Amino acid sequence: MIVTGIESFVCRVPVSDKAAAHGVYPNIHVTRVTTDAGINGYEFVPTRPWALEKARKLVVGQDPHEVERFIQQGLLRAPAVEAALWDIIGKAAGQPVKNLLGKVRDRIPCYLTCVWPGAADQSDVTYDQQAADLKYYKDHGFKAAKIRGFRRPITADADAVRTIRDLVGGRDEFQIMIDRTGPYSGTIWTLDEAIIMARQFEALDVTWLEEPMNRGDVFDHARLRATVDIPITGGEGDYGLTMFAKYLQHGSFDILQPEPNNCGGLLTTKKVGALAEAFGVQCVPHGTHGLMLASRLQIEACIPSCWILEVALTNPPLLPWEQWEHCLALVNQDTLYDVEDGEFIISDRPGLGLDVNEKAIEKYRVS
């Protein structure tokens, strides 16, 4: 079997009025790898033109199984192509990718990363509204959610969590995570601010505090982690393995959160998990939504310390399946994913677990 082509394009699938009103867009990005055996591999993530060209030079005309060789030659810069290759390999073998990379689980709990429309710091959303929306998700079987910690003064988000806790109950009933997202929050906490807030969140039984300081700050994160009890997490913006090794060497994080589309793909994400395991640190990859979740589920089935899946970004008050309903137009499935009591069942379909409708891909393709 030989790779014959690699494409990256957009499908535009109509969304419902309700979904559109809450920020769901009709555009679905597609990266497709074709072979002379008639087996196509898909990942629903865009590949930049320069990375697409590099991937074509590396992979077209080659055996799609040689993933590690391609990575060593530079395929880290085209992670969607790497995922699509795994889709091909799985389909050719008649096996889901989780079976090829060494699965440890067939289902996984999830948390919803909730971002409300309006100001990025969520300052125009009341604490009561946040609490009501998370209670709504709890009532639909979900047991965990993450919210932004961007507000000023810095104690405001602790007040928000306090209000949420009053409505959803304690951690044994509903977990809450806090995401600072490093510099993307608009401000960067000092170490002193991070310690103050970490201790406030500890008192509210928050599950973890994510990227509380600048991305790539190995030492202040390590100082924070050594000072407080709440788990400190990060790593979604890092590429390759080097920074993850530094985090582990210096004790920066309790949980590493590689983003497969940043670090270099599914196999590199599994390598990060192995590095973390050697240091007794958990690896819980950064999340996504819609069709992109398929590959995420397959790799998280294979990381022993990964205990929860991030569904991001979730737009309250939409339920996840309302948000990805339009994606069903591109697959031969009645449901995109099976979710039971807040847990995702990881697909046993060959490849990345999606039965892609090739005719629908062409029907909705716009570029």
Image (tube, helix red, strand yellow):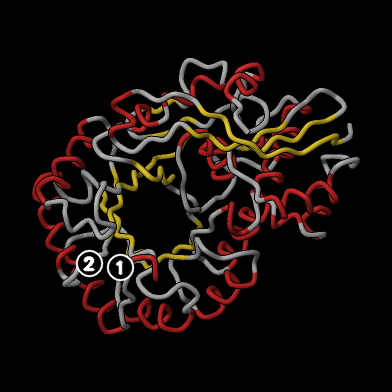
Residue indicated by mark 2 = 202
Instruction: Answer left or right for 116 relative to 334.
Output: left
Label 2 neighbourhood size at 10 Å, few (<14), some (14-19), many (20+)?
some
Whole-angstrom CA distance, mark 2 to mark 1, is: 6 Å
Residue indicated by mark 1 = 230
Label 1 neighbourhood size at 10 Å, few (<14), some (14-19), many (20+)?
many
| Residue 8 spot, x, y in % from top left | 67, 39
| Residue 205 spot, x, y in % from top left | 21, 60
Query: Label 2 amino acid?
Result: Glu
Instruction: Answer left or right for 294 relative to 202.
Output: right
Nearer the observer, 124 or 99: 124
- Residue 298, compared with residue 39, is above or below; it is below
Q: Secondary structure beneath disc 2?
A: helix
Of pointers 2 and 1, the one earlier in the residue sequence: 2
| Residue 136 spot, x, y in % from top left | 19, 35
> Which of the 4 image quarters holds residue 242?
bottom right
Query: Label 1 amino acid?
Result: Ile
Residue drawn at (34%, 41%) of the image: 314
Q: Quadrant of the N terminus?
A: top right
- Residue 50, compared with residue 193, is above or below; it is above
Q: Residue furthest front?
A: 367
Residue drawn at (63%, 53%) of the image: 270
Residue drawn at (32%, 83%) of the image: 191
